[in-house]
């Protein structure tokens, strides 16, 4: 593909994205993201029994409790502090568990903490 | 030129389902070095230096598209997961990416694994290792 054609395609995508993504996400607040999360994985490479015990609790006092594991994978528990921070690229807001960031996506009926967009892995809780 | 050729090869291998689906690029490879110069990687490094965050997900979208600019590797990779390990002389940055039909369709389409037989558009995985020295 020539650079000129690629640039044109990028501009077309950008224009479509501007139109399609004009809805702004509500502000990410402690009240909005606190709560009990369940784990979702659409990754065909992952076994459900490796992560069926996963859970994440974000307390409104800024502490979290993360359990990862499943019936075929030993579970581990981690506790620490979480916070909300601006992420990158600009406009992204992260929930950061100690030093690990998760971009927040607010949907109509749920709050997602994104782990992998390519394969579809995230934490979710009802909004 | 080498990185552009590598991107063309990865694109061809994804669509055809031929050749290895999992690739790792070392810090001295042209592909990792071109990726290291990209806007998204600079965004990640800035985030690390400013907040101390050592792992996360870089979401592409429109800002990512603009940040990637004409960088062929960044445009191919799109969104990626990243983790940073501090070293004596700087940091090691590891980027992992999956190329899938799902990501090609902006996360709404299906995805499938590669099989032992050529599987067109089955998921392929890339890891880019980047070393950055403290200045």
Image (cartoon, coloured by chain):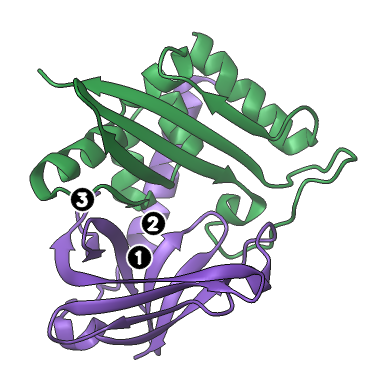
* Nearest to the observer: residue B53 or residue A93: B53
Residue A96 at what x, y percent from top left?
A: 23, 63
Other-residue count near label 2 (Cα within 10 Å), few / some / many at <14 / 14–19 / ≥20: few
**Relative vertical location of residue A72 with respect to residue B26 in this rendering, above or below:** below
Residue A69 at what x, y percent from top left?
A: 53, 71
**Relative vertical location of residue A37 with respect to residue B69 in this rendering, above or below:** below
Name the side, left or right, on which B30 lies relative to A100: right
Q: Secondary structure at mark 3?
A: loop
The residue singled out by tag 3 in the image is B53
The residue singled out by tag 1 in the image is A21
Do the residues marked 2 and 3 share a common chain? no
Residue situated furthest right in the rendering: B117
Which of the chains bears the disc numbered 1?
A
Rendered hue of chain B is green
Q: CA distance from mark 1 to mark 2?
A: 6 Å
Give the residue displayed 38% in from the left and 17% down from the top: B33
**Chain letter tied to purple:** A
The residue singled out by tag 2 in the image is A17
Other-residue count near label 3 (Cα within 10 Å), few / some / many at <14 / 14–19 / ≥20: many
Residue A14 at what x, y percent from top left?
A: 37, 48
Which of the chains bears the disc numbered 3?
B
């Amino acid at each position: 593909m020539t650079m000129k054609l690629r640039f044109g395609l990028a501009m077309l995508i950008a224009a479509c994205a501007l139109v399609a993504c004009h809805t702004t996400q509500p502000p990410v607040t402690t009240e909005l993201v606190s709560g009990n999360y369940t784990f979702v994985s659409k990754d065909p490479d992952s076994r459900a029994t490796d992560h069926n015990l996963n859970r994440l609790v974000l307390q409104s006092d800024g502490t979290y409790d993360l359990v990862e594991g499943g019936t075929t994978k030993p579970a581990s528990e981690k506790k620490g502090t979480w916070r909300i921070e601006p992420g990158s690229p600009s406009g992204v807001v992260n929930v950061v568990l100690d030093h690990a960031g998760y971009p927040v996506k607010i949907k109509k009926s749920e709050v997602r903490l994104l782990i992998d967009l390519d394969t579809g892995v995230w934490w979710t809780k009802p909004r | 030129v080498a990185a552009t050729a590598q991107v063309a090869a990865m694109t061809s291998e994804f669509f055809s389902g031929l050749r290895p689906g999992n690739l790792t690029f070392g810090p001295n490879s042209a592909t990792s070095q071109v990726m290291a110069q990209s806007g998204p990687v600079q965004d990640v490094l800035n985030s690390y230096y400013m907040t101390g965050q050592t792992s996360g997900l870089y979401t592409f979208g429109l800002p990512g598209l603009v940040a990637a600019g004409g960088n062929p590797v960044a445009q191919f990779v799109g969104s990626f997961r990243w983790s940073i390990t501090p070293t004596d002389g700087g940091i090691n940055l590891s980027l992992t990416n999956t190329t899938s039909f799902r990501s090609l369709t902006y996360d709404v389409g299906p995805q499938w694994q590669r099989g032992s037989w050529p599987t067109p558009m089955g998921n392929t995985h890339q890891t880019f290792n980047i070393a950055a020295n403290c200045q």
